Each structure stands twice: as structure tokens, then as C-alpha cells.
Image: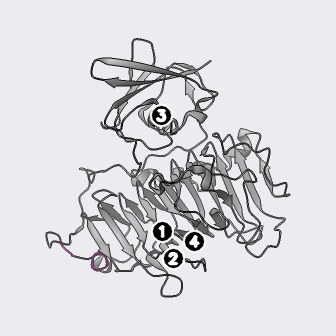
Amino acid sequence: MTIFFICCMICASISHVLLDASKHPSFLNSLDKLGFKSSDKVLIAFKPGKGKYAAFDGEMNAEEVERLVGFVLNGDVKFTKKRQKPKINENNGYEVVIGSWSRCSAEPLAPPINITFNATVAQDGSGDYTTIKAAIDAAPVGSANRYYIHVKQGVYRDEYVTVGKNKINIALIGDDAHNTVITGRWSIATGYASMIVDGSGFMARSITFENSTPPTNSHQAAVALTNNADRSAFYQCVFLGYQGTLLANHNRQFYKDCDIYSSVYFVWGYAKAVFQDCRLYALRIGSDGNVITAQGKDSPTFDSGFSFQNCNVTVDPNLGLPKSEVSVVLGQPWKDYATVVFMESFLDDIVKPEGWSISWDNIPKPHIFYAEYNNWGPGANTSGRVKWPGCRVLTSAAEATRFTVSKFIDGDAWIPEMGIPYQGGLNA
């Protein structure tokens, strides 16, 4: 039996809590009940041996440990130190020291030192441009080489930037997602998205994309980002909105270690996209509950779908509401062949037992492909799921592998060049 050791180190004293790996999901978010404070240091040690959710066989890299620590604390965790290989403690467990768990968002990340920026955007005039739009407009057309734009911290409001189809291989690198924010307030009635990306090979890192349009009963989309770009990737970014936050609209897309906040339709569109190690936060109570996906595959030959791997579906911790008052479904089909897979992810108890919702037009879609594989947490029980022909639980790794980064979006062919870490296959 695998045991998780969670220790609170207060001055010289140490108290221990032992968690059975088969029961630890019910322990999520309960550190406060044990008297742990956000100012305390928490030590997580993983006892070697085979666990249900990962292999603890004496070899575990820092990213794997960080993901598991995030699961134990429901994602609300941030390392106090840079990622490093965990040391072996006296009990032959793995130790990682972490700090506050009050809220999880993209970790502040300085621009990589090995990058020579082609342009810098700074609102205080210390860069080449004061607006992101000006930097994008000045970028070369059809560049075969990546064009790096450093976006210094600031709130870039109401620019409504479009990265055109001829602006390929653009990279926007923020100082950190807390302080580098692209925001707008257009809705479908007034103009749509805070930012639109069409040029292939686009990447963004450490930036928040926000649509500040308040929620309405009309459920009109108010998009933070519309992404049409093939081979596009977003790393440690935040997508913040209330209705239709992220329009993953076309082509192959990858989202790594991102936060997505929404209520109605967190992610929607026609793209073929993988979301890995992302956190999806329900923002508010809706009359019909919140909806994570509205996927738009509209024919059996259309190459389209959403895959969520090692993700975390939970409530926004800043709502101040008990989770019992918030509910979500994993998807509502937008088109007849909607394809969505959640695998190896934590599903909190805000996920409704039925799991999925009928189409917005109240017409059943018999050709959908809604699947779950090896998820865990109080919302992962599939016994109460809807019994539609298109809803299924995948039972083999071979089936699930089709929806991994390497297979589903051919990530091995284009993600490494971007310098973004990723997991090509399933968990060990």
C-alpha cells in the first residue's frame, strides 16, 4: 500500500498525517482543517512503491512530483524553489518543500536567458514599442525563424491585437502571468475577442489573456483568446473570462500548465487541441451549472477534438462558496461529432454525476465521442454518467494513447523547438 506523508514543519516541531493512496482524493483541500496555515512550510514525501496515479519506483523527476503535489493540494500550490530533482529522505521517500497553497496560477517566470529578443514592449517607454499591436505589426512577414517579443509587465488594455496569417513563428514572452495581462471587454455583440491568433507556429508564455465582460443571462460569448493557429502553444498562461473564455478554433494546439477560468463554455471551437497539466476553475454558479467544453467537430472526417490530460477541474478558490453550491459538466456537444476526452485528470466533486450535458438545441447527438480514462477524485465516478451511445469509459491504454500529445497533435514534430516541456504519452 502506497502511503503519502504530509508533514507540517512549524519551528522545531513536526506533525505527521498519513494518507492511504486509495483514499487521498477525499483529503483534498482539507489542510486548513488540520490547522495548517498558508505561512507554514509543508513537506510532501512520497514513499517509493507502486501507486495508483503514478509510479513511485525510485525514479521520479521534479515535474512529476510537482504535478502530484498539486493533486494532493488540489492544485493550489506553488514551489518556493526552482524545480529540482527531489532528494531521498531518511525514510526513503521523496521530499519537496513548498509554500502557500492559497491560490494556484502560472508561476512567475523570467524570460529565458538564452533567448535574444527581437523586440521589447514596455508601457513605460523602456522598450522598442509601447503596445503589443505595434510590435506585432512591425514583425516580419513569413519569417522562417522564430521572432521573439518580450512583453514587459503591465496591463495592456483594449488593444484587440490580431496576429495575422502572414505573421508566422511569433513568440510573446511575458514577465509573468500575474503581471503581464492582455485584456479587453468585447463580446460577440461588439467585436468578440481580446486577442486573435491566425499565424502558424505562434507561442505565448507567462501571459494572462482576459475578457472582462461581465456575465449575462444571454450566454453571449466574450472571448479572451481566439486561436486559429496551427502548431500553436501556450505555456504557463492564464485565460480569464466568464462566457466562452478560450475559442480553440482551428488546427493543432497545445496548452501546458495553464489556468482557465470561466463559467459557460471554458473551451470551445473546432481545433484539435491537447490541454496538459492545466487547471480549469469554475467561476460562478449558473442556472444550469457550468460547462467545460463545447466542441465543434461536425463530420466524421473532420480532424478535430479536445484532450485533457493530467488536468484539474475544480471551483475557483476565490468564490468563497462551498463546492456543494457549484456544479459543472465536462461537455455539451456543439456539433454532431463533438469529441472530448478527459484522462488521468483530477475531477473535483463539482462535476455532476451525469458528467455530460445534452446539446444546447436539446437534440441528442448520437455520433459524439465523449470519453474518460483513468481519472480520479470525487467527481470521477462514472457509474452515474449519461448512457448515450457516444459516451464511454476507455478501458485500455491503447485507446487512450490516441489522445496523447505525441499521437493526437503530432506534438513530437513541433513542440520541442519551442522549448516547452511536455509529456508525449500516458502516465507511467
What residue is pinned by disc 4?
249
Specify whether 108 is left or right of 257: left
Q: Nearer the viewer, residue 19 or 278?
A: 19
The answer to whether mark 2 and mark 1 are in CB contact below 8 A is: yes
Q: Position of residue 71 (x, y in %)?
A: 52, 38
Q: Distance between the residues labelled 4 and 2?
A: 14 Å
User: Which quadrant is the C terminus positioned in?
Assistant: top right
**Picture mark count:** 4
Q: Which stretch did the figure color magenta?
A: 126-135
Q: Position of residue 102 (x, y in %)?
A: 39, 45
Q: What element carries label 1?
A: loop
Name the residue type under label 2.
Answer: Ala
What residue is pinned by disc 1?
241
Check residue 33 in the rendering and tell me which mark sits there, or answer none: 3
In magenta stretch: residue 87: no
Specify whether 422 is left or right of 328: left
Q: Residue at x 59, y 35 (%)?
A: 25
Q: Residues within 10 Å of mark 4 (few under 14, many from 20)?
A: many
